[in-house]
Image (tube, grey):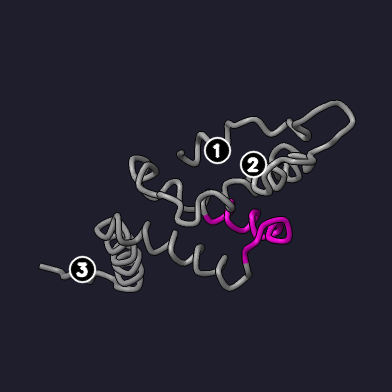
Amino acid sequence: SSVNNTYLSNHTLVEIGGFGFGNVGNPSAIVEYLTLNKLQNCAAAICKILDSHPDIDIEPLFQWKLKCLPLVVRWLENARSYLGNVNESTGTFQCRQLSALYKFVRGMPLLTVDGYRGKEMKEIESKSKKRKFDL
């Protein structure tokens, strides 16, 4: 399933089973997701994405070039606060963040290099002054 499908999935179910029996007899993975659903809707979606997609596919975002990079960075920083609800260490999460950034740079090397060089060239041009010669 894709990240989008996970995000759009049902985050409102909190119990499956007979009336008054709770989640007794349900598989542990399902009980874990039902427990996540007790969080706010957005938090449940973030936790499920972190849990279900250890290697998030960044390639669909390439159509917007580097415009999505700040959004991905912000989403990952926001997701860090939910690590207590997911079975993932801080070190593993940091690797996930670096992997996502690496995929952006690797997927669009010309944009990132030109962006850096373009900034560097603008700084050089702003420092240099052209001389006027009297003819």
Which residue is tagged 1? 6
* Tag 3 residue: 132
Q: For the view shown, which residue lies furthest in the left direction?
A: 135
Q: Nearer the viewer, residue 114 or 94?
A: 94
Question: Residue 105 versus residue 38: which sits nearer the camera?
Answer: 38
- Kindly indicate whether the residue at mark 1 contacts the one at mark 3 (C-beta within 8 angstroms): no
Q: Tell me the residue at 65%/49% (across/down).
A: 47
Q: Is residue 62 magenta?
A: no
Seen at 59% across and 52% down, the residue is 51
Q: Position of residue 7 (x, y in %)?
A: 57, 37
Magenta stretch in the rendered image:
73-88
Q: Is residue 16 left or right of residue 111?
A: right
Residue at the image position 49 percent from the left and 41 percent from the top: 3
User: What kind of residue is marked 2?
Assistant: Ala
Residue located beneath label 2 in the image: 45
Residues packed near mark 3 inside 10 Å, few (<14), some (14 to 19) or many (20 plus): few
Q: Find out whether the residues at labels 2 and 3 contact each other: C-beta distance under 8 Å.
A: no
Tag 3 secondary structure: loop
Whether 120 is drawn above or below 56: the answer is below
Residue type marked 1: Thr
The disc, 1 or 2, on the residue closer to the chain's N-terminal end is 1
Q: Nearer the viewer, mark 2 or mark 3?
A: 2
